[in-house]
Image (spheres, rainbow, N blue to C red):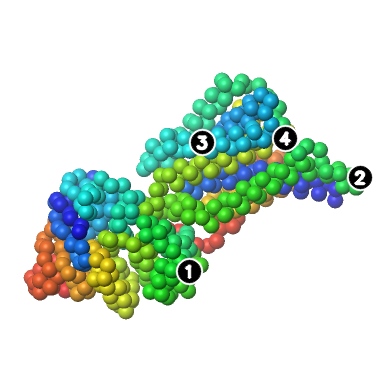
Amino acid sequence: MQQLITTVLTGLTLGAVYAAFALALVLIWRATRIVNFAQAPMAMITTYIALVLIDAGMSYWVGFAAALVSGLVLGALVERFVIRHLTGKSEINAVILTLGLFIVIHALAALIFGARYRSFPAPFGLRGFQVGDTTIALTGFGVFTILSVVGVMVLLVLLFRGTDVGLRMRASAFNQEMARLLGVRVGRMLTLGWALAAVVGSLSGLLIAGGGLVHPSYMDGVVVYGFVAAVLGGLDSPPGAVAGGVILGLSLSLVSGYVGSELVPLASLVILMAVLLVRPGGLFAQVRERRV
Amino acid sequence: MLTVDDLTASYGPVTALDGVSFEAPRGEITAVLGANGAGKTTLLRTVSGLIRPTRGTARLGEHDLTSVPTERMAELGLAHVPEGRGVITELTVEENLRLGALGRGRRGPADLDRAYALFPILAERRGRSAHVLSGGERQMLVIARALLAAPSVLLLDEPSLGLAPRIVAQIFDLLRSLVESDGLTVLLVEQNARSALSIADRGVVLNLGRVVVRDTAAALAGDDALRHAYLGF
Ligand SMILES: Nc1ncnc2c1ncn2[C@@H]1O[C@H](COP(=O)(O)OP(=O)(O)OP(=O)(O)O)[C@@H](O)[C@H]1O
Ligand SMILES: [Mg+2]
C-alpha cells in the first residue's frame, strides 16, 4: 500500500512535467504541423538564463519569470526568422531545420554556460510531506509542479475557448486560407503560437531542473517522454497532451517501482508502439472523417 | 465598383486566366459563367489575393487588390465564399460565425441572432462542431459568415452547390435585397447559368480563361447561340 501510494505520487509529479513538455509540442504541431525537436534545447537555454540570475543573487522567482519571458521571445524569434521561411516547402525541411536548431542551441549553451553540471534550486522544499509518522513521496516542489501545469492548462483553455485571439489562433491552425480570407493575420497568430509553446516548454525546463542538475543536455531525455505523451494524447489536443503526460508518468512510475527502473525507457517505447498500433489517433481520438 | 483589367494568371505552364477585363458595378450582381475549367474559381481567387496574377489589376476604389495581402481584404470590405471547404470543421457553428463577425464590422450578438433568424437550422446547431453539418448547412454557414463581415463586395463561388431549390431561392432573394438596400456588389460564380442570370444584372462568360462575352443578364439569357455553346441551357 505504502509503495503504491509512493509510486502513484511520483508518477503524478513526473507526469505533470511530461505533460508540460507534451503541451509545448502539441501547440506547435497543431499550428504548423511541425514536431519541434528544438523544444528541449530552447527550454534548456531559458533555464540557464534563470540560473545565471539566481546565481547572481536574485530570487528564484525573478529567474523563473525571466525564463518564461525569454521563452516567449525565443519562440517568437524562432518562428519569425527560421520557421517562417519554410512556408510551402516540404515537411522534411522542417524536421531537418529543428534538428539543426537543436545542435546549434546545444553548442551555443556549452560555449556560453560551460558543459559542467550546475545545481538548480527548487522552491517550496524537496522533503516529502509527513503523514502521521510516514513520509510520503510528495514534496512541496512536487505540489507546485502539478499545480503550475494544471494552471497552464486552464489558462490555455480559457485563451483558446474564451477569447477572440484564441479563436483566431485556432482558425489559423486549422484552415490558414479561410482564416486569411476572414481577415485573420495568420502570420502573427503562428508567431504567437510558437511563443506560447516556448513559454510552456520553458516551464517544463524549470520544473525538470528544480532540485536537480542543469547541463546542456539535461532536457534531451525528456524529448522522448514528452513526445510519447503527446502521441498518447493524439498530438492535436492540448487536454490530450496533459492526459497523455499523466498516464505516461503513472505507467512509467509503476514500471520503475514494480519491475525495475532500467526498463523505463523501453517501457515508454512499448507504450508508444502499442498506441500507434491500436489507436493511431491517440487514446482520445473520436471517430471522425478526415478532410481529404 | 470592382474593376478587373487584363487579369492574367497561371498554374505553372497552364494559363488559367488570360487577359480578363470587366466591371462589376456597385449595387449590382454580376454573374461569372462558363463551363468546368473555364477559370471562374481562378478569377475569384486572384481577386482576393490567394493567387497572384502575372499581369493585370483588380481595383476596388483606390486600392489595387493585386498588391493587397489576402488577410487585409476583409478590412477593405471584400468577402470571398470559396468553392466547397469554406467551413472550418474543427470549430463550432457559432465559432465560425463569430470569426466572420470579428472583421471590420465588429458585429455583436445581435448580428449573430439575425444570421440565425435567416438560417434557423444553424441556430439549432450553434454549439455543435461544424463538421456535423450537411453540405447544404455548410453552404448556409459560409454565406451567413461572409455577410457577418459586413462586406461591400461579395465574391460567391457556386453558392447553390448542394442546396435545395427552396434554400437557393431564399439565398438569392436575400442577395437581391442586400444589393438593392445596401448597395452590395456581388460577383456570383454559378454552374447553373439559368438561375444565376435570373437574379443577376449582368454577366461575364468565360471560356478557357478568356472573356467570350460581357453583357446584361437579359441579353445573355436571350442569346440562343451563346446559351447553347457556353451556358448549357
Ligand atoms: N491548383 C491548380 N493547379 C493546376 N491547374 C489548376 C489548378 N486549379 C485549377 N487549374 C486549372 O485551371 C483551369 C481553370 O480552373 P478553375 O478552377 O478556375 O475553373 P472553374 O471555372 O472554376 O471550373 P469549375 O466550374 O469546375 O469549378 C483549369 O484548366 C484547371 O485545370
Ligand atoms: Mg470553380
Labelled disc at residue A122: 4
Depicted B147 relative to depicted A99: above or below? below
Ligand 1 is within 8 Å of the C-beta of the residue at disc 3: no
Asked whether the residues under the numbered discs 1 and 4 touch, taking CB atoms below 8 Å apart as contact, a structural biologist would say no
Q: Looking at this view, is B216 or A275 the one in front?
A: B216
The kind of residue on which mark 2 rests is Asp
Query: Which structural element holds mark 2?
Result: loop
- Dot 4 falls on a residue whose secondary structure is loop
Disc 2 under 8 Å from ligand 1? The reply is no
CA distance for labels 3 and 1: 37 Å
Q: Ligand 1: does it lie within 8 Å of the C-beta at label 4?
A: no
Chain ID, mark 3: A
Dot 4 or dot 2: first in sequence order is 4
Circle 3 residue: A73
Picture quarter containing residue B81?
bottom left
**Classed neighbour count for the residue bearing mark 2: other residues with Cα under 10 Å, few (<14), some (14–19), many (≥20):** few
Name the amino acid, label 1: Arg
Q: Is residue A231 above or below residue A42?
A: below
